Image (cartoon, rainbow, N blue to C red):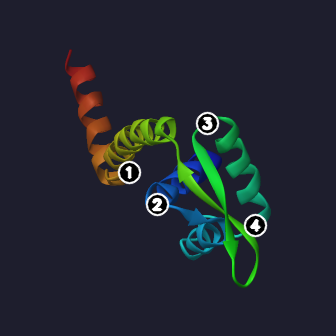
Amino acid sequence: MRKGILEYCIMHIISRGEVYASDMLEELTTAKIMVVEGTLYPLLTRLRKAGLVEYKWVESNSGPPRKYYTLTEQGSSFLDSLDTTWQDLVKSTQLITSKKKEENSEENNDDNNNTTQD
């Protein structure tokens, strides 16, 4: 589950425009989604091989050239689908986790009372 959420977050970061991997890593680390650099690059490679992201090399004044990532058209469509799935998951999870222990006990008591009255 965490891997899927990480990929979703990476794609969201990339969807904002061209982004360098270290900037993604910084945002993910700040959000406490990921702290290990070795996790990011294999995910970016997997997303690229799936045709969801692409990159271009940009020369740097302060060192070697850098890869800047963008979403492909297919990646944008896939991200839209993930957004819908995420919103449905959040709603479903909130429905379940918003109930208090007493509510569940009352519902169980009501169910038991209805069963004994039948």
Q: Position of residue 36 (x, y in %)?
A: 75, 67
**Badge 3 is on which residue?**
51
User: Could you tell me which secondary element the residue under label 1 belongs to?
Assistant: helix
Question: Marks 2 and 4: in contact by CB < 8 Å?
Answer: no
Q: Which residue is mark 4?
A: 37
Which residue is at 32% across, 54% downward?
Answer: 100
> Nearer the N terminus, badge 4 or badge 2?
2
Residue 76 vertical placement versus 30 (above, below): above
Residue 76 image point, x, y percent: 44, 42
Residue that mark 2 sits on: 17
Q: CA distance from mark 1 to mark 2?
A: 35 Å
- Measured as percent of width and height from the top left, residue 89 is found at 40, 41
Q: Amino acid at mark 1?
A: Thr
Q: Secondary structure at mark 3?
A: loop
Query: Is the Cβ of the residue at disc 1 closer than 8 Å to that at disc 4?
Result: no
Q: Earlier in the sequence, mark 2 or mark 3?
A: 2
Camera-side mark, 1 or 3 = 3
Instruction: Indicate the amino acid at tag 3.
Output: Gly
Task: Judge the density around disc 2: few (<14), some (14-19), many (≥20) Cα neighbours within 10 Å.
Answer: few
Name the residue type under label 2.
Gly
Left or right: where does residue 14 sit relative to residue 43? left
Q: Are marks 2 and 3 in contact (CB under 8 Å)?
A: no
Residue 1 in view, yes or no: no
Q: Kindly identify the residue that appears in the image at 66 percent across and 43 percent down.
A: 48
Q: Looking at the image, is mark 1 or mark 4 earlier in the sequence?
A: 4
Q: Residue at label 1?
A: 97
